[in-house]
């Protein structure tokens, strides 16, 4: 009985990994065909043009007593 449950979970996990892998490869192939990889190389996802360096600075600390 326990072997059946373990086998079922193992097959489910292997199937899910295979489905995710195929899906990921098809997305990568589509992105490569559209040239999205080269366009995204120059972009930094953590830096936005809307916020300059002054927006990322910490506010000044109040004086200590």
Image (cartoon, rainbow, N blue to C red):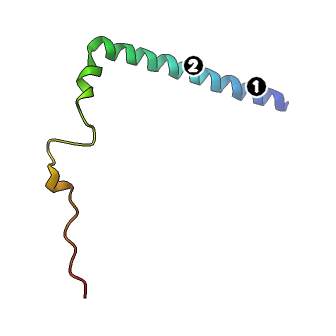
Cβ atoms under marks 2 and 1 closer than 8 Å: no
Which residue matches tag 2? 18
Q: Callout 1: helix, strand or loop? A: helix
On screen, residue 64 above or below 16: below
Quarter-of-image position of residue 9: top right
Residue 5 percent location from the top left of the image: 77, 30
The quarter of the rendered structure image containing the C terminus is bottom left
Which of discs 2 and 1 lies nearer the camera? The answer is: 2
Query: In the figure, is residue 59 to the left or right of 23?
Result: left
Which residue matches tag 1? 7
Q: Callout 2: helix, strand or loop? A: helix
Q: Which numbered disc covers residue 41?
A: none
Identify the residue at image location x=25%, y=36%.
44
Identify the residue at image location x=26%, y=15%.
35
Query: In the figure, is residue 1 to the left or right of 42?
Result: right
Query: In the figure, is residue 3 to the left or right of 30?
Result: right
Q: Residues within 10 Å of mark 2 (few under 14, many from 20)?
A: few
Q: 13 or 5, which lies in front?
A: 13
Q: Residues within 10 Å of mark 1 (few under 14, many from 20)?
A: few
Q: 12 or 64, which lies in front?
A: 64
N-terminal of the two: label 2 or label 1?
Answer: 1
On screen, residue 50 above or below 41: below
Residue 49 percent location from the top left of the image: 15, 41
Quarter-of-image position of residue 46: top left
Which residue is outermost to the right? Answer: 1
């Amino acid at each position: 009985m326990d072997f059946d449950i373990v086998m079922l979970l193992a097959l489910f996990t292997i199937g899910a990994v295979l489905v995710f892998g195929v899906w990921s490869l098809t997305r990568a192939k589509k992105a490569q065909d559209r040239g999205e990889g080269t366009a995204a190389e120059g972009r930094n996802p953590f830096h936005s043009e809307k916020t300059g360096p002054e927006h990322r600075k910490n506010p000044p600390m109040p004086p200590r007593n």
